[in-house]
Image: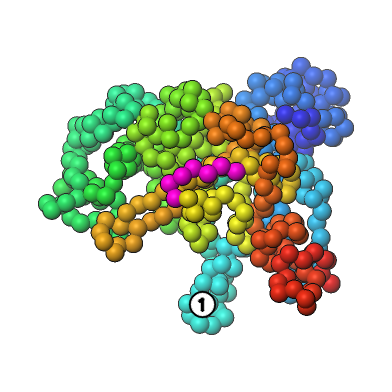
Amino acid sequence: MRKTFMGVQLRRLREERGLTQVALSRTLGLSASYLNQIEQNQRPLTVPVLLKISAALGVDVQRFSDDEEARLVAGLCDVVAEQPPAGAPAQQVSMAEIRELAASMPAVARTLMGLHTRHRQALERIEALSERLGDERGTQGGAALPPMAYEEVRDYFFAHHNHMAELDDAAERCAAQWQLEPRRAEAALVQRLAQAHGVRVVTSGPDAPVLTGGAQRLYDPAAGVLYLSGLLEPGQRNFQMATQLAFLEMEPILQRLAQDARLSSQQARQLARIGLANYFAGALLMPYKAFLQAAEAERYDIERLGLLFGVGFEAVCHRLSMLQRPQARGVPFIFIRVDRAGNISKRQSATHFHFSRVGGTCPLWNVYEAFAQPGRIVTQLARMPDGRTYLWVARTVAHSGGAWGAPGKLHAVALGCDIQHAPRWVYAQGLNLTDPAAAVPIGMGCKVCERTDCPQRAFPPMGREVAVDERRSTLAPYPVVQAG
């Protein structure tokens, strides 16, 4: 960790614990004047002092990490990129001001991001409702519409770095107690459902209900039967059985975590409960310690790990993005799933990276190139506007519709990590990680990207306008100038 000034965060931590400067300085073995200088940002918070704070107060060092600051900076860029209401003066916020806010007052930064998220979600609901009603009404009784449930749940997992320690620990214990073995977990899962809960597993067919609407699992508690879709692969069947076991055995924990998330609606809490159950299922089939050891031994080879644990490509990618247990962290990955239209249906991150929610994603990103080479892994070194470079791996995953003419599902799954971790990843073989020119310049979406010379630019950044040249047929590639 670089030396950095985080006096405000340290002062807030001390106040949360009800400690005076003198008391904390004694606990840390520092002089009161030295601690005061750190809190006043006259001295940096160094690694030795940070380790003392972590040991004495039990604070996760992630709270003071560069990654956490970068997450806040990326989120604040979305906030300031929004255009002001009509008639309101435009306020240009510099990157230096954004970084200062993220570093010195992270709680204020998170509050602003939360307000911005609720504002944006309300506007999206207003637009959707207006289109449905065919008029300009977008509120009910003068009150703003509530945020969209799935966005709230996604933010909840993102805020926890996609790591739920309580569920991970419980899944690891259950895997040991039930004697789940990689690639041979199906028999143990069927046995646990039958012996502990009296549930019989039936794969849908001539003698079972037909699962419609893309359903993969149907549980009939009265009959004690769990119906599984006949279209599922073995690893997918195991995942569905593990998810049902999560509902049967971990319900109190699922309910408590969903309630503690402080979500705004019952629908959001129900979605959070489902997401937590899916998290438990992945952790049960790929127990933390065993999976991390295998990942390190195989240099995070996704296909190799899939063979070792009997799961699919997407399941391995998702699990790799969860390995952030304190004292036993894996590579901090970013996991994302998109369709051909660019809709993001899954987005999890154990690090600071995220694409903007304003204006779509970047067409130069290799997750879209994967659709042109279905079933093949494609790699990319990508450099963001802030100078950070990432190694990305992407591949398509397909699900059959089950009959001739029935539409199936096709997504591209991408996994990425900061270039500093790339040497630990098998997909870095043959890539020049030290040459800046080897990285493709991409952005977080046209509306918040400042790259004015991008050939794929669809429209100018928010709050700005492009110079018009009548000799050209498009405005996109032209230099951006200040509006007004």
User: Mark 1 — residue?
Assistant: 131
Q: Residue at x 71, y 74 (%)?
A: 473
Q: What scheme was used to colour the molecule? A: rainbow
Q: Looking at the picture, which amino acid does disc 1 mark?
A: Glu
Above or below, 81 against 250 in this view is below
Q: Is residue 377 magenta?
A: yes
* Residue 222 pos. (x, y %): 17, 49
* Residue 156 pos. (x, y %): 53, 47
Q: Magenta span covers which residues? A: 374-380
Q: Classify mark 1: residues with Cα within 10 Å, few (<14), some (14-19) or many (20+).
A: few
* Residue 28 pos. (x, y %): 74, 20
Q: Is residue 105 left or right of residue 314?
A: right
Q: Is residue 426 visible?
A: yes
Name the quadrant of the N terminus: top right
Q: Is residue 56 left or right of residue 279?
A: right
> Which of the 4 image quadrants contains residue 20?
top right
Q: Is residue 279 visible?
A: no
Q: Residue at x 32, y 39 (%)?
A: 235
Q: Residue at x 28, y 46 (%)?
A: 232
Question: Which is more toward the observer, 305 or 257?
Answer: 305
Q: Is residue 470 left or right of residue 363?
A: right
Above or below, 296 against 267 in this view is above
Q: Is residue 19 magenta?
A: no
Above or below, 241 against 57 in this view is below
